[in-house]
Image (cartoon, helix red, strand yellow):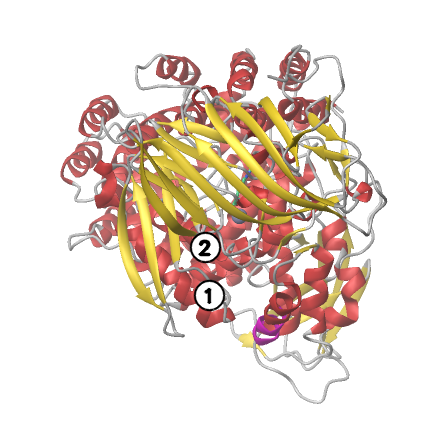
């Protein structure tokens, strides 16, 4: 076992140091003798020198392996070890290399490489887990053909899976059996997978457009088969969508999904053998919420789409991670939108995606971990599976689509896969292909500047200012863009920013748009392409001072500042034809009220931050029969504490919490009669269906219950809490049941205890539901510091386990990362708790620990006494001697 030398500073890997590998691996023939305590791995490879680089020794990566034997062309070879690398000198031009190692999957709590979960073997190799299975050139640009033989006890491990096609299986002596798999596609080591255990599968045979047959399988534990229908349907929909939208077919005879309850991440796109966290596979109406159903659809789609964007064309090096992740998130977002029957449901999905971007990625881009979509350096690549790489990366791809049009983008994708099929490439290659397929486009014209989105970190700020000239009947919009410094990047060059724009009249009509110099006006939205630090656009024939609707559909990942008057925002909220900007106007109004109250006189929490005009607008929106329930739910949900905090230079988290709570109470009491009506009108009666329309109705009914219970809390009324408890008891599906439970818990009502106890009793054998039970409590609104003691209690519950990432997240992350009002305590006890958990987790699972370590990323914005106390807690973690490089990198950057 090789542990990192505690004294040595971990070294940064730099993008500019990329060198092609000195050797290629053409074939890999792996034989596994599976045993939880000691698994034996025989690795036979054919290698050849890369003629394009100067001769050098072969350096193979390894991690926590026991090496037994190394043979070159069948002969014992001399080798040396340098840290974790196995080095062989004086090799011939091409040769066979045989390496025999053992590892201990049962002891693998890092859940990288080969590990055991509930008596089943699983692998996770991305990014650098394959080196924990055998010595290898563990980098994505080395692509090989794999043959895998798995041998194991027949009774304990009846199902033996790996990538590709099953070519042989049979019995072995002593109750053992074997299976041999051949993957028809060359692949990098991070896409290798193996699964062995007692599993059952839901199967479906489908015929693709070209007439080929495919076998689809979803493998789970025996009791979970009744929760696999939705995942299977999502897979079938994904296959059909990729073929219809991008002409990309399923290229495998057999496509498998396997679920495990111990997983560091959401899921993994191993070629032909996707491995998923159970959270993103298992669902039935009794145990999963609408949100779970929709997440499953996205994640199944995401992993399936990787089969092309990731597997057929992969990354040259890990700095290019967004090449596959940004593109694949974009693809899964488009997939979910395209599945929506109604245009309003598409808009709802877009709003939800932007909300994630702004509450998670914008803070990342403004904090110590800020990095470009294509980073320049890293210490531990696992730390760079971030919202910047994924979500901002998807926005960059979306802007390309905006600049070349939907059809043009499809042409670009076609060219990209034609040009690079079977290769490991870069973000530059991708952008080039989209531009080359659209030579007349703005993207092609502006490509080098556009690519600053890949190289410059930080969220650009765009300020817009409009001036109406009544004499000329013209309207001039001026834009100024800037981007704040980020670590290592003090100055930024201007970005290419596509701004989708419309103009409304003061009474809310969409106005025709005619730029000065144009012959005729055009209708609806148009895209202005900004390229300079400052620029102006003048519209002519504008009848009266318009209300600009800027950045429709959130056409670029920027912060838009515009000096809107309240009346203008109310006009946009009531009338904008762009649902995104309609929602955005409501968010701006609420945000403004919140900031005013937060910055107002510090004596006592502002009693009523929201004005009558806002409440009236919300009331009429709720009553509008034309609007979709899902959209209403989004508009009536206030900006999160995290998002509010991001707008402030100095953050007093308790004040933010108090003000937002006061706003919630205002919405609850001020709209009480409407909430009653909304609840009665939207409570579901018919059979359960997770489609967006029905889910939207349940979401709005759930929000109504939250406000009704909250109002009851202030008035002391017992009717609604009673009704909510009844709803909890006779709900026909998990969404309604959980929403009722949430209403009781989040309003802090006395009936919550009883409901929580019965919820636990009802679902004690459903791990994913028990996760919800933990997470709801740890994430509940803090009242007088009551959450931290509760969280400590929850950690002593017999169902709690630190080793299971889902469970650890449900308690610890729900508190530390998702409950600012409870974490930031004047007595610093929340930070002490955080630091202890980071250190405790670090010894078990560095990836999970490093994620938790990021909960205090934004410490330097905090007001005193929080700021100093948080810093002290981070320093305590940083000074721990044998910290993993994962956590080390996060806390060092936080303190830099
Ligand atoms: N590629 C996987 C996905 O579909 C995630 C892998 C995450 N790996 C990691 N080391 N965090 O997004
Ligand atoms: Zn992915």
Q: Position of residue 430 (x, y in %)?
A: 68, 61
From what the image shows, is residue 404 above or below residue 798?
A: below
Q: Position of residue 374 (x, y in %)?
A: 71, 47
Mark 1 within 8 Å of ligand 2, using the beta carbon: no
Q: Secondary structure at mark 1?
A: helix
Quarter of the image containing the N terminus?
top right
Mark 2 within 8 Å of ligand 1, using the beta carbon: no
Give the Cα distance between marks 1 and 2: 9 Å
Magenta-drawn stretch contains 457: no
From what the image shows, is residue 393 above or below residue 846?
A: below
Overall secondary structure of the magenta stretch? helix
| Camera-nearest residue between 892 and 651 | 892
Give left or right: position of 232 versus 364: left
**Snapshot quadrant of residue 896:** top right
Q: Earlier in the sequence, mark 1 or mark 2?
A: 1
Around disc 1, counting alpha carbons within 10 Å, would you say few (fewer than 14), some (14 to 19), or many (20 or more)? many
Q: Secondary structure at mark 2?
A: helix
Q: Are marks 1 and 2 in contact (CB under 8 Å)?
A: yes
| Camera-nearest residue between 379 and 714 | 379
Which residue does the numbered mark 2 point to in the structure image? 304
Q: Is residue 857 visible?
A: no
| Camera-nearest residue between 139 and 91 | 91
From what the image shows, is residue 540 above or below residue 175?
A: below
Q: Is residue 74 visible?
A: yes
From what the image shows, is residue 260 above or below residue 332?
A: above
Around disc 2, counting alpha carbons within 10 Å, would you say few (fewer than 14), some (14 to 19), or many (20 or more)? many
Q: Position of residue 81 (x, y in %)?
A: 72, 22
Q: Residue 242 bears which disc, if any?
A: 1
Ligand 1, what quadrant? top right
Q: Which residues are magenta?
A: 406-412
């Amino acid at each position: 076992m090789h542990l990192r030398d505690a004294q040595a500073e971990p070294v940064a890997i730099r993008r500019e140091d990329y060198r092609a590998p000195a050797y290629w691996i053409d074939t890999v023939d792996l034989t596994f003798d599976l045993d939880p305590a000691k698994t034996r791995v025989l690795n036979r490879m054919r290698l050849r020198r890369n003629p394009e680089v100067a001769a050098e020794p072969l350096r193979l990566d390894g991690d926590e392996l026991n090496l037994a034997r190394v043979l070159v062309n069948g002969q014992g070879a001399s080798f040396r070890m340098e840290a974790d690398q196995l080095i062989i000198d004086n090799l011939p031009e091409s040769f066979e290399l045989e390496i025999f190692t053992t590892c201990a999957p049962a002891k693998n709590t890092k859940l990288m490489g080969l590990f055991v979960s509930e008596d089943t073997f699983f692998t996770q190799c991305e990014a650098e887990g394959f080196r924990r299975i055998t010595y290898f050139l563990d980098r994505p640009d080395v692509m090989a053909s794999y043959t895998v033989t798995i041998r194991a006890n027949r009774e304990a491990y009846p199902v033996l899976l790996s990538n590709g096609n099953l070519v042989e299986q049979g019995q072995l002596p002593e109750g053992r059996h074997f299976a041999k798999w051949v993957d028809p596609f060359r692949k990098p080591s991070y896409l290798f997978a193996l699964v062995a255990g007692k599993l059952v599968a839901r199967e479906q045979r489908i015929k693709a457009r070209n007439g080929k047959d495919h076998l689809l399988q979803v493998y789970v534990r025996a009791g979970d088969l009744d929760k696999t229908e939705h995942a299977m349907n999502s897979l079938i929909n994904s296959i059909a969508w990729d073929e219809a939208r991008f002409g990309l077919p399923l290229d495998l005879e057999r496509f498998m999904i396997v679920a495990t309850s111990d997983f560091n991440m959401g899921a993994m796109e191993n070629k032909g053998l996707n491995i998923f966290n159970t959270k993103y596979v298992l669902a039935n109406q009794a145990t999963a919420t609408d949100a779970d159903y929709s997440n499953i659809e996205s994640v199944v789609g995401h992993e399936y789409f990787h089969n092309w964007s990731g597997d057929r064309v992969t990354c040259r090096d890990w700095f290019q991670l967004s090449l596959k992740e940004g593109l694949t998130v974009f693809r899964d977002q488009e997939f979910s939108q395209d599945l929506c029957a109604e245009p309003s449901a598409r808009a709802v999905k877009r709003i939800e995606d932007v909300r994630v971007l702004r509450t998670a990625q914008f803070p990342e881009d403004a904090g110590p971990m800020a990095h470009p979509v294509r980073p320049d350096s890293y210490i531990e690549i696992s730390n760079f599976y971030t919202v910047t790489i994924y979500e901002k990366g998807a926005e960059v791809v979306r802007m390309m689509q905006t600049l070349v049009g939907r059809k043009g983008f499809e042409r670009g994708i076609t060219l990209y896969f034609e040009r690079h099929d079977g290769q490991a490439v870069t973000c530059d290659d991708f952008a080039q292909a989209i531009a080359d397929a659209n030579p007349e486009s703005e993207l092609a014209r502006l490509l080098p500047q556009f690519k600053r989105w890949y190289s410059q970190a930080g969220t650009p700020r765009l300020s817009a200012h409009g001036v109406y000239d009544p004499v000329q009947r013209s309207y001039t919009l001026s834009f100024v863009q800037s981007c704040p410094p980020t670590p290592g990047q003090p100055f930024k060059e201007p970005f290419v920013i596509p701004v989708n724009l419309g103009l409304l009249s003061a009474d809310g009509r969409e106005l025709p748009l005619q730029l000065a110099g144009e012959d005729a006006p055009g209708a609806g939205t148009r895209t202005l392409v900004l390229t300079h630090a400052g620029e102006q656009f003048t519209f002519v024939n504008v009848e009266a001072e318009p209300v600009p609707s800027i950045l429709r559909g959130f056409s670029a990942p920027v912060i838009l500042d515009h000096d809107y008057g309240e009346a203008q925002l109310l006009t946009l909220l009531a009338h904008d034809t762009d649902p995104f900007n309609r929602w955005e106007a409501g968010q701006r109004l609420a945000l403004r009220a919140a900031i005013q109250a937060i910055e107002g006189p510090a004596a006592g929490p502002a009693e009523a931050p929201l004005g009558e005009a806002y409440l009236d607008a919300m009331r009429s929106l709720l009553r509008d029969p034309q609007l979709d329930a899902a959209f209403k739910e989004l508009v009536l949900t206030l900006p999160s504490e995290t998002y509010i905090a991001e707008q402030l230079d100095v953050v007093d988290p308790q004040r933010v919490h108090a003000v937002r709570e006061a706003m919630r109470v205002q919405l609850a009491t001020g709209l009480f009669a409407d909430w009653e009506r909304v609840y009665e009108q939207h409570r579901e009666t018919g059979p359960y269906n997770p489609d967006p329309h029905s889910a939207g109705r349940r979401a709005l009914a759930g929000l109504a219950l939250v406000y009704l219970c909250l109002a009851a809390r202030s008035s002391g009324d017992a009717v609604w809490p009673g009704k909510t408890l009844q709803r909890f008891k006779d709900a026909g599906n998990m969404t309604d049941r959980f929403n009722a439970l949430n209403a009781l818990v989040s309003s802090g009502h006395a009936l919550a205890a009883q409901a929580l106890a019965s919820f636990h009793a009802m679902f004690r054998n459903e791990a994913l539901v028990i996760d919800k039970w933990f997470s709801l409590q740890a994430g509940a609104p803090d009242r007088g510091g009551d959450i931290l003691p509760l969280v400590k209690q929850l950690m002593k519950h017999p169902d709690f386990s630190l080793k299971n990432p889902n469970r650890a997240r449900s308690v610890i992350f729900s508190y530390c990362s998702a409950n600012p009002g409870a974490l930031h305590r004047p007595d610093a006890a929340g930070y002490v708790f955080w630091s202890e958990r980071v250190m405790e987790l670090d010894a078990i699972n560095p990836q999970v620990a490093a994620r938790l370590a990021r909960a205090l990323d934004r410490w330097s914005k905090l007001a005193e006494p929080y700021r100093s106390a948080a810093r002290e807690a981070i320093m305590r973690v940083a000074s721990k001697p044998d910290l993993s490089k994962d956590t080390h990198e996060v806390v060092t950057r936080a303190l830099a």
